[in-house]
């Protein structure tokens, strides 16, 4: 594991792990950092849009977010530098704006709900995953040991998020997954259009010629 190969990704993972571990044994710390729309609206605690993205509910929640981020984050960090897309500045914008924008719909829906809380890096991780799909749509991800191309996973994932969000099932913030994913795609398309529009023919060529397993 070479830190120098993806310093931003490893640094973000380290920050998430450290802050989450502190939160596991400090309820007061979590209470001050968690996404709490009711408090944000009344106390103007807008910092929660950022801090909530660095704490997690438990080790399983932390592991799955960071495990996903480890694989896709390193790829995006490389792509943004290799293809002249703003490098680490663009990468950090993708991550932090993903955290913020993914939580806005939940904030708007729950700003008068005292009991609503949300936490986790899911919005940012979803943004990074879906940004990566543009560069390697036919790469393979294992879902319960079943190999699945990124692009098929993307559509299934979005459909699942929309379905679960409408039914409001469970304690997972499915809105954050959904809006983080959409933001990641839109941000990256705009970034390419602004800095490297010559990439679009290659992207379309890649999309139209499946080659599973790469």
Image (cartoon, grey):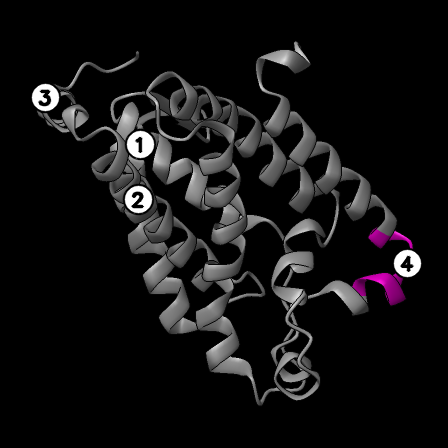
The residues colored magenta run 23-30
Mark in the foreground, 4 or 2: 2
- Residue 205 shows which numbered tag? 3
Q: Where's residue 192, x and y in %? A: 26, 34
122 relative position to 200: left or right:
right
Q: Quadrant of the N terminus?
A: top right
Most frequent secondary structure within the magenta stretch: helix
- Residue 133 shows which numbered tag? 1
| Disc 3 from disc 2: Cα separation | 18 Å
Marks 3,2: beta carbons within 8 A: no
Check disc 4 and report the residue beneath it: 26
| Disc 1 from disc 2: Cα separation | 8 Å
10 relative position to 92: left or right:
right
When asked about the image quadrant of residue 156, the answer is: top left
Q: Secondary structure at mark 4?
A: loop
Residue at 47% x, 81% y: name it.
109
Marks 4,2: beta carbons within 8 A: no
When asked about the image quadrant of residue 211, the answer is: top left
Marks 1,4: beta carbons within 8 A: no
The question of residue 28 being in magenta is answered with yes
Mark in the foreground, 3 or 4: 3
Q: Where's residue 27, x and y in %? A: 87, 64
Marks 1,2: beta carbons within 8 A: yes
Marks 3,4: beta carbons within 8 A: no
């Amino acid at each position: 594991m070479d830190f120098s190969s993806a310093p931003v990704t490893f640094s973000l993972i380290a920050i998430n792990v450290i802050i989450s571990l502190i939160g596991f044994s400090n309820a007061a710390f979590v209470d001050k950092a968690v996404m709490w729309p009711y408090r944000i609206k009344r106390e103007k605690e807008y910092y929660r849009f950022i801090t909530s993205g660095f704490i997690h509910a438990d080790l399983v929640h932390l592991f799955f977010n960071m495990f996903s981020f480890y694989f896709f984050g390193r790829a995006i960090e490389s792509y943004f530098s290799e293809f002249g897309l703003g490098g680490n500045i663009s990468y950090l914008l993708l991550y932090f704006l993903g955290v913020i924008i993914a939580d806005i719909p939940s904030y708007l829906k729950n700003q008068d709900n005292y009991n609503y809380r949300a936490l986790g890096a899911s919005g940012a991780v979803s943004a990074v995953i879906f940004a990566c799909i543009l560069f390697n749509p036919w790469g393979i991800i294992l879902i319960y040991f079943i190999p699945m191309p990124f692009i098929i996973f993307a559509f299934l994932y979005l459909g699942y998020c929309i379905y679960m969000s409408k039914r409001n099932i469970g304690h997972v913030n499915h809105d954050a997954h959904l809006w983080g994913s959409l933001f990641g795609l839109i941000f990256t398309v705009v970034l390419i259009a602004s800095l490297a529009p010559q990439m679009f023919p290659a992207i379309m060529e890649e999309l139209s010629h499946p080659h599973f397993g790469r």
